[in-house]
Image (cartoon, rainbow, N blue to C red):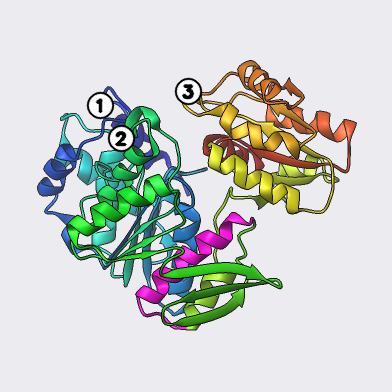
Amino acid sequence: MTTQGSDRILQRMLTLHPKIIDLTLDRMWRLLEALGHPEHALPPVIHLAGTNGKGSTQAMIRAGLEAMGLRVHAYTSPHLARFHERIRLAGTLITEEALTEVLDECAAANGDTPITYFEITTCAALLAMSRVPADYTLLEVGLGGRLDATNVVEHPALSIITPVSMDHEQFLGDTLGKIAGEKAGILKRGVPCIVGPQEDAALEVIEAKAARLGAPLLAYGQHWHVWEERGRLVYQDETGLCDLPLPVLPGAHQIQNAGAALAALRALQMPEAACEGAMTRAVWPARMQRLREGPLAQSAPSLELWLDGGHNPAAGHALATHLASLPERPTYLICGMLNTKDAGGYMHPLAQVVSSLTAVSIPGEQNTLPAERTAAIAAESGIPSSTAGTVAEALASIAEKDPSARVLICGSLYLAGAVLRENG
């Protein structure tokens, strides 16, 4: 399958606005009107916002719904290897032909009028999903919530806010309360909202917004609880208790993401078979993904190789907790980050559980933090560090020094995408 047609259109769409991010809904409303308002023709929408866990929670909800034979649209961002990953129609990634068609249609309707890349491609996703029969639509917020391009559905079936933490402060605000206010912008009058674990400052803002809108909240620690017990996941809410397998997505933090997914499925009145499917069938690349095949993995077969795209302090804490829970083995990081992220906040919790960090620049990414700067921040965080020209070079160096090591490639979804493309 060639992606040449869609790639060419997507490249042109990058030139339609001087900024990558310019938060407003005005351009969305204009183009959606020109397209005949496809957002009004979607199957029931589940809208997800939050700083961490949106993608994993969405993947588990989709797995649960699909376990019941339901057809599910899903929209997520960013993609890892190919843009097509962002749009799933009734369970299947959008085809090149269908993607090219809706991109062409959106480009023609928009003309040369300024619009951001994310906005026009979100319109294309909504257009594609409006034309394919399905039972549910899962929409993941790109950035924030209140002014995010996905926030155009007037009455979703359900909203979800996963844990909120500090990230994208230059766009969303410099306090947890301000950021939570932007995430709470997806709340709609009368629409129930599942709320994952939150710090008090975030929860207060979400609760206040929900009260103003009359949006019922189903909040972690109040209306539902989830925990691990004897190698099983136990979920409890006001209607009863579920004893389920642990989620197939690894990491202690996935217990809480699983809880939000289960709360959503139960709010949709799905049976326990859907809940079990959510735990056992979910797939979400670059979230502690084990790489066993492909050129990179085969270049150092004795290494235990992992890939993760988490990139903020909360993700660093989650990774550190997970690494500490694994069987004891020397662990080395290969890390590349964007210059817009809190690299020190991400690395600091990892200092206690890793042996060293090899820094790389993210290939083809203009906002990459230079490898030298990444290494310097690692050293400041207490992690012995060095640099390498590529991930492959870093792997070869680690394999030569410690052939039985555990290696985690981490720091950015953009680095994860480059690795998945290279590992083919």
Residue 311 visible in the shown view: no
Residue 22 within the magenta-colored segment of the rendering: no
250 or 109: which is nearer to us? 250
Secondary element at image label 2: helix
* Crowd tier of the residue under label 1, counting other residues whose Cα lies within 10 Å: few below 14, some 14–19, many 20 or above: some
Query: Quick one: label 2 or label 1, which is nearer the N terminus?
Result: 1
Determine which residue is flagged by label 3: 367
* Crowd tier of the residue under label 2, counting other residues whose Cα lies within 10 Å: few below 14, some 14–19, many 20 or above: some
Q: Nearer the viewer, mark 1 or mark 3?
A: 3
Tell whether label 1 touches label 2 (CB within 8 Å): yes
In magenta, the rendered stretch is 251-271
Determine which residue is flagged by label 1: 17
Q: CA distance from mark 1 to mark 3?
A: 18 Å
Secondary element at image label 1: loop
Determine which residue is flagged by label 2: 117
Magenta: main secondary structure equals helix
**71 displayed left or right of 395:** left
**208 displayed left or right of 97:** left
Indicate which disc residue 2 carries: none
**Residue visible at 52% across and 64% down in the picture:** 258
* Crowd tier of the residue under label 3, counting other residues whose Cα lies within 10 Å: few below 14, some 14–19, many 20 or above: few
Dividing the picture into quadrants, the one containing residue 15 is: top left
Q: CA distance from mark 3 to mark 2?
A: 16 Å
Secondary element at image label 3: loop
**419 displayed left or right of 44:** right
Residue 261 within the magenta-colored segment of the rendering: yes
In the picture shown, does residue 24 fall above or below 56? above
> Please, what is the three-letter code of the amino acid marked with disc 2?
Tyr
Query: Quick one: label 3 or label 2, which is nearer the N terminus?
Result: 2
